[in-house]
Amino acid sequence: MTQTSETPREARASTGIAGLDDIVGGGLPVHHLYLVDGEPGSGKTTLALQFLLEGAARGERGLYVTLSESRAELEGVAASHGWSLDTIDIFELNAATVGQEEYTLFHPAEVEFQQTMESVIGMLEQSSAARVVFDSLSEMRLLARDALRFRRQILALKQFFATRPCTVLLLDDKTAPDGDMQLHSIAHGVMRLEHIAMEYGAERRRLQVTKLRGSRFWGGFHDFRIATGGIAVFPRIRHTVPASQGPGHEIRSGSAELDALLGGGLSCGTSTLVTGAAGTGKTTLSLAYVQAAVQRGERVRMYLFDERVTTFRMRAAGLGLDVHAAIEDGRLRVVQVEPTEMSPGEFANDVVHAVEDDEVTLVVIDSVNGYMNAMPSERQLGIQLHELLSYLAGRRVTSILTLVQRGIFGNPVDEAAEVSYLADTVVLLRYFEHVGSVRQAISVVKKRSGSHERTIREYRVGPGGIIVGEPLTEFQGVLSGVPQYTGSSRPMLLMNTSNPAK
């Protein structure tokens, strides 16, 4: 929907959750009834309390009608987040309706539904709340004992609220029969919360807005986390069409030979995949571009999935690459990611903030294998990685990804096939054998943004980083791991790297 300048924007009620407000276009349209649907433990109560507390902070009175939890339980939830509920009215419906008749919600068949609803309406008529939460509809469904009667009462409740200036959240824990969409059709908007148990590691939580009448919203699933302080929602990356820009400049690595192999360097705003077996120097090659970028005064963000930050710093120091100063002054930030603890959506959200808030121009993901471990499935890996790389390209941010192939002499083409099509440039690192020693080769197999060398060069990781030799013109079968040498017995790169110029 497109709003014209003559149509005033509909007033919105902020949920108190920045990511959720972003998804629904700035907040929930006011004076409507919304359904928050999710299994027990998915975060409905926490979301509802944040919604009411945000209203209280804006001077709006809030009312929490609870049929399932006591005031003490709600205050316990609030205390765990450092909140106080003193500014919110809490109405314990079970206490009001049971009272002297000693009915309990554990025996709903003995409770008169009409009496319950009269208590609700009476409380609402006395209240001047601008925000109301019902927790939860499952108890009302049990009291009604009949689907038609329940639907009629919810419709009556909606009509009652239609005459009052308040925004309402109805919480439901998926106790409705399969295929029953009555509440979804009645509500002005619907949010679904899901709690997914993983085979290993922390659980995943995700949110989906499935309906919001008369308003645009960002569909699909969005990861979220419940932590001390409330819910944090991580919206999916939006694909935006970049502004028309000229061709990007070439980014140098500091190694003339490496830059020549890449046809002058990496094109600004493109993605590069560096793939090879463990120990072939993927991180070190990436570090060459990182060091060159920070020396130019740019800001860089490195995400380590497979290595500790302390180990990374020791490795860099051992190669004679000083990253300490860049880390201290903020030009370089190295983030250690635990795939079992951080969801893909949270990771992508962190990258977006690095680009938009910290003005990062180079992002390194080491490695895609670790990123893959954070994915529920390989299919989602390709989709989310594509969104992330497209976003970075649109912002003219250069990205470098590393991919570890399985085994030492396995087929690297098979390993990289599923993600290499996403990258603009693919650099292949390879072990090969020569005269009883293990050597390493580097080649560029793809570069969308321009020409590159088709040769295979020997290289070595040594003091100062990557040392790239001359093209292996006298070899055949280097990529197979067991090449045939057709030239003289003169070595390509001396095993002693103390004098790499020889």
Image (spheres, rainbow, N blue to C red):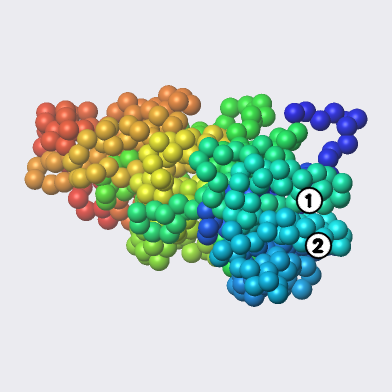
Find numbered disc 2 in the image and state the secondary structure of the residue it sits on.
helix
In front of the other: 274 or 185: 185
Q: Amino acid at mark 1?
A: Thr
Compare marks 1 and 2 and give the one earlier in the sequence: 2
In front of the other: 418 or 199: 199
- Pinpoint residue 186: horizontal percent, then vertical percent: 70, 39
- Pinpoint residue 455: horizontal percent, then vertical percent: 29, 28
In the image, residue 57 sits, relative to residue 11, either above or below, namely below
Determine whether, in the image, residue 368 is placed left or right of residue 210.
left
Find numbered disc 1 in the image and state the secondary structure of the residue it sits on.
strand
Q: Amino acid at mark 2?
A: Met
Which label was assigned to residue 123?
2
Who's the residue at 74% across and 43% down the image?
A: 155
Q: What's the distance in space between the residues labelled 1 and 2, CA to CA?
A: 16 Å
Inspect this view and state whether residue 326 appears.
no
- Pinpoint residue 376: horizontal percent, then vertical percent: 41, 45
- Name the quarter where the N terminus is drawn: top right
Residue holding disc 1: 167
Determine whether, in the image, residue 372 is placed left or right of residue 299.
left
Tell me which corner region of the image, top left, top right, bottom left or bottom right, holds residue 89. Answer: bottom right
Q: Are marks 1 and 2 in contact (CB under 8 Å)?
A: no
Inspect this view and state whether residue 381 appears.
yes
Determine whether, in the image, residue 216 is placed left or right of residue 162.
left
Q: Callout 1 environment at 10 Å: few (<14), some (14 to 19), or many (20+)?
A: many
